[in-house]
Every structure is written in C-alpha cells, then in structure tokens.
Image (tube, rainbow, N blue to C red):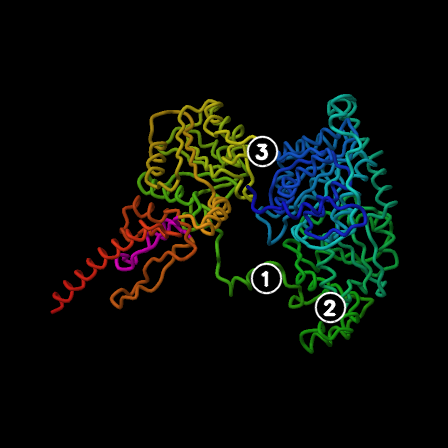
Amino acid sequence: MAERSFKKEVQQLRIGAGEEFRGEGILAVTKALLQSGVGYVAGYQGSPISHLMDVLADANDILQELGVHFEASASEATAAATLAASVMYPIRGAVTWKSTVGTNVASDALANLASGGVTGGALVIVGEDYGEGSSIMQERSHAFAMKSQIWLLDPRPNLESMVKAVEDGFELSEASKTPVMLQLRIRGCHVHGRFTAKENKRPAFSLAQALESPARDTSRIVLPPASFLHEQEKIKERWPAAIRYIKEHQLNEHFAGDHDDIGLILQGGLYNGVIRSLQLLGLADNFGNSRIPLYVMNVTYPVIEDEVIGFCRGKRAVLLLEEGQPDYIEQNLHAVLRKAGIDTHLSGKDVLPMAGEYTTQVMRDGLREFLKRHRPESLLTHPAVMADSAAETRLLQSTEVSRPKPARPAEQPITFHKQVEGLAAVVPPRPAGFCTGCPERPIFSALTLAQETLGQHHISCDIGCHLFSILPPFNLGATTMGYGLGASSAAAFNVPAAKRPISIMGDGGFWHNGLSSGIGNAVFNKYDGVIVIVDNFYASATGGQDILSSRADNPDRSTNNPIDQAVRGVGVKWVRTLDRTYDVARVRATLEEALTTDVQGPKVIIAQSECMLNKQRRIKPLFNKAVKEGRRVVKERFGVDPDVCTGDHACIRLSGCPSLTVKDSGDPLKEDPVAHVDSSCVGCGNCGEVAHAAVLCPSFYRADVVHNPTGGDRILARVRGAVIGFLQRRRAARLSQHAL
C-alpha cells in the first residue's frame, strides 16, 4: 500500500503518437521510458522518486503488455546490479533510487558496470533531493559520475526537456557504451506540464530472447587484465564517443540575448529558477526570453570544452550557476578557459553561496552582484531592482565597467545561513516527530521508562521514522550511520560492561541491509547487545510500500514472510516478538528483560504494529462505506477528564502525541492548563497506556462513538445516561450539603 495511488493517472501512459500528455514530471518520465523501448525497470523508493516507483507499480499491467519487466529491488545495490542485463545484450534497462545515499549503496555495482561498459542503453534515474526539501545530508551525485566516468544529465525542469533527456540518455549510453545517470530534482519530479507523446515501443530485444541465446564476452567482465584496459577504453573510446554524440545532437542548449558581452552558464535543473531571477531583475520577459545569453548544461558531465570556449569567447564576463559543493564544474571551466587562452572572467561561488540551495532569492542576489561588477547599466533599466539606497545607486552609476570594483561587505548577497537565521527569529522551531497514533511512539516511551529504572544506555539509531526518537520529547539515540546499519553502528561496543548497548532498526532497513550487515554480523561476532526491530508492516518512511514482511496480500509480490524466522535462520537464539506495541508495560518489561538477562549473544526484540498512516488509508474508506450503507460501526476516541487531571503534563512528556495538547481547565482554582485530546485523535490508546505504565494519574478515558446504533445500543445508552445522571445529582446534593 503506497502513499497514494496512480491507478487513474497511469492510463495516460497508453496514449499514442501526436496526442497531448498532461501530468506530473514523474508520470512523464515513465511515459518516456515506454517510448524509448525500455526492456526492464527496477529501483528502490526514496525522496523524491518514491512516486516513480509507485507509478511503475500501478502501471505494471501496462508494462507487462509491452513486455517490460518491473520489480521493486531489495536495495539500491540490487537495482544497480540489475543493469547487468544490459552488459552483454542490446536490452535497454533503467533503475531508480534516492541519491546520494542510494548511489553510495549502489556504488560497487555501478563501478563494475561503468568499468566493463554496456551494450544496451543503461539509465540510472537518481532523485536529487538537495536543499531545504531534502531528508538527507547535503551532497551531490556529481562526484559519483566523475569517479566512475558515468555521464550525468541534469535536464531543464519541464516535461518536454525531461522526456527528451530520458530518450537522449538511452541513445547516449548506447553510442558511448557507458551507463548514463539522469538527475531529477525535487521540483522536476513534481512539476506539471504537457508534451506531445510518441508511440510506446516494445523492447527491440527481450529478456526472454537473451535467455534463449546467451552471450558471453570476457573482455566485458571486470577481471585483470581486462579491467586494466577498461580505464583506457573509457578515455580513448567512450569519452570521445559521448562528446561527439552530445555535440551532434545538441543536448546542451544555447539561448541568445542582446547583452552579448556577458553570459550565464547554468545547470539545466536550475533553469526555471534562473529565468525567474532574471524576470525579477527586469532581464527576462514573461515568456522566459532572457536578455543575457544562456548556455544551459543539460549534460553536466562530461563538460563539452568546445561549447564552453565558443560561448565564452568575446565576452568580458560569464557567471556559472552551480548548486552545491565542491564546485566541480567551476574548477573544470577555469581549467578549460585558461588552457584555451580565453581571458573571459568566470564568476561563480565568488558571488553565489558555496553551499546551500540556490533558491530564486539566492540566485537573484548573486546575479545582481555579478551585474553590478560587470554590467551595472543593465540593472538601471528596471526601476524595481535598482539599488536599495541613494548611496548604492550612485555607486552603480559611477562604476567603471572596464575595472570592476570589489563589493563592499554590506553588498554581499544574502547567504543561506543568513536566511535561516532570519527565519529562526520569527518562526518557532518545530522538530520532526511521529504521526498521530504512530505505533513507534510507545516503543520509545517504554524505552524511556526502562532507562529510568536501569540507567542511561548507549543507543544506536537507524534511518526511518524511528529516527525521530532522537528529538524531543524522547531525546534517545547517539548515532545514525545509514539505512539498515543500526545494529552495525553499535558493533564496536561488543565488550564486557555493566550495561548493554541498544540499537534500533526498522523492518524496511532490516530487509534492505540489516539482516546481513546487522543481525548476521552480530551472530558471527557473538554480540551481546539488544537489537530492536520496529516492524510497522511497510517501508513507511518512503511512502508505505510493501516489503517482504508486509501483511498485505499483494498479487505481484511475496509478502507475509516473518522477520523472526529470518532472524532465527541466521542464528539468533534470544528472540521476543511483541504483536502490539501500544502495550507500553509489556514493551518496557521485555526491554528490561533483554538488558538484564544472563543469556549471551544478540537479544532481538521485534516490535510489531501497523503504521497508523497506512492503517487509516486502509480502514477509512471501509469505515465510510459501512456508515453510508447503514451498518453499525464503532470509532474509539480518547479524552482527558479535566476534573481529574492535575496539570502535571508528564503524560505529554512521555508520549509526545500531536493530538495530546493542553487547554484551560475552566476551574478558577486550577491555574495550570490541563491535558486535552484534540479532534485529530485516531484512538490508538497510547496516551492511556503510557499513563498506566508510568503510574500516572487516571485521567484518561475511552469513548466509543457508535454510528448507526441498533435498538440495543439506544436502550443501553438510556440506561447509562440514567445511572450517570443519578450519580451526578447525588454528588451535587452532597456538595451542596457540605457547602451549607
């Protein structure tokens, strides 16, 4: 069960040549794959290309009609290794994952693939979630492309350009016998637009044909002495072939402008932001026509030296817009221009931030600084962007174009960090946290209570929703090293000590990497720590996709494979399975048992409860349908009795549920606000369980909201109302007597 369904949208993938395709970037890329005659697609979900995997899954019947094989891979390494089908056979294959961490996982397979080269087109679609929208460390895919000599495409973020990049990517790969990496930024993945479609193509050479006629070429296998020759082949044959194809087919674009003594060189993915920045400066119209010439690098690696030299020749200055660091392209262009004897001034990170996302504001400020130094009169044509003060205006008017003056400190563009500091002054911090009703929250409530009894322990975290435990209110965990590496990152602590280390991993991380790297390693090295596997039935952090241990009945995948069997299969003897994480007292007791038992070896606790987001997606339509059909259904809600609540709020500190908040007590004798459960409650019961396990006040209650009540329900409600009314009247009478 994915985050959303594309069953309706994928029907557009069937349209033929000449028809107009409308939709999101992810759908357009899928259509481009089919138009290119792809033979197989694989990948691992992650931001911002999770939806690409979801689209492919929902379109699997269409893929099968065309003879295209699709599978969701166990990891990015698995996906990259899948491209081996294109090494010996003329089959086009594509894989996708989140970069840069996904590319790191896949780097071994990618290095081997790039070394031996390919026969069929091999396309690696990486979701470049760099910047404020990212969920990972800030790094770039560019380094991987350079390291392994994989060509890197970064198309302009519109549907036509992205579709063309997919088609060009396969052609470029086959022309140069090299895998090609297609970088899709967050905005490109989700941009909406249109393009004229082509016919879908069946693979020219199928996987079945390959199996019937196996091929073998030892020169393509990465073993000495062939591997020594691969490096020479990359430089002497594949590189020139790639350069030739890129130039002949004009994959990079040049847009003319009337300010032809200066120019802008930019990564294709930044194009929309650059045009908007120019519009704000009065240097581009509403149709995107720039007054400054543009050289758009839809191919950011390799750099086409002839094109760069031709663009820069005759210009006094050029600004390179390269997002992220290190400044690979800027260093490359400096070398190209100087070796060619071109004296054009190249600006880049001197007027733009070295690090941080290049938003429209950042690029506008950098462009303005560049123009102030090299063509200040261009700014004076647009009053809205003239200098902010009379003094700066005089500076602009008096600037000598032939001798650019260094900018004063006050004139430096607003940096990323200054923007963040400015926002922090007016926007309160809001740390990421678990969703309402998340079954992982009670696990960490129990761990907090266990540590109150046994003392603080070293805790190694993992990638996934459970990583939110490092933030308030739990503040648990010391490290996180990678997806499925929770247990591995505690491996060094396998020494005799008074306290055992604790590590956490999710079910997605377990199947991705944790079974071998974490559990198997722990068994092999007789690790004596505690490993908690959070089993919420899905790869939840990436959108709720099914995995091996999912409980769903998936017709295309094998699910319902228990984690505990896999754990026991690699040799773990001490295993405890908890089938309801909301039972905080039981989870706490199990953790304390694992931390104190005399049994040696890894102690594995499998804590199981369904992801609440996916559960709500599953049960809400069924609930609403039942209500409409007049069937009796019950919805559980929880609340806090304001008369009983003391206002201590320990329940909130131990739970942190977004639906558990505070409100005025309504009692003039109670100055402190009381706890309150708001309307977002999903009835998981965690708040009450925590209060019970921690021996807190008994102020929580459960209310069953009955829809379409039966006659018996109505009679029972009247009886309850009468009894409660009687007790309330008796209590009020006693209070009035005491008052007298």
Q: Position of residue 523 (x, y in %)?
A: 47, 24
Secondary structure type for disc 1: helix
| Spatial CA span between label 2 and label 1 | 20 Å
Residue at left offset 75%, top offset 69%: 282
Mark 3 and mark 2 in contact? Answer it, CB < 8 Å: no
Location of the N terminus by quadrant is top right
Secondary structure type for disc 3: loop
The image quarter containing residue 225 is top right
Q: Position of residue 228 (x, y in %)?
A: 77, 26
**Residue under numbered circle 3:** 555
**Residue under numbered circle 1:** 419
Task: Give the mark nearest the N terminus, 1 or 3.
Answer: 1
In the foreground, 80 or 7: 7
In the foreground, 339 or 519: 519
Vertical side of 736 occupied by 154: above or below: above
Q: Label 3 is placed on what type of residue?
A: Pro
Task: Give the mark nearest the N terminus, 3 or 2.
Answer: 2
| Spatial CA span between label 3 and label 2 | 55 Å
Task: Give the mark nearest the N terminus, 2 or 1.
Answer: 2
**Residue under numbered circle 2:** 281
Identify the mark at residue 7; answer none if there is no mark.
Answer: none
Magenta extent = 633-657
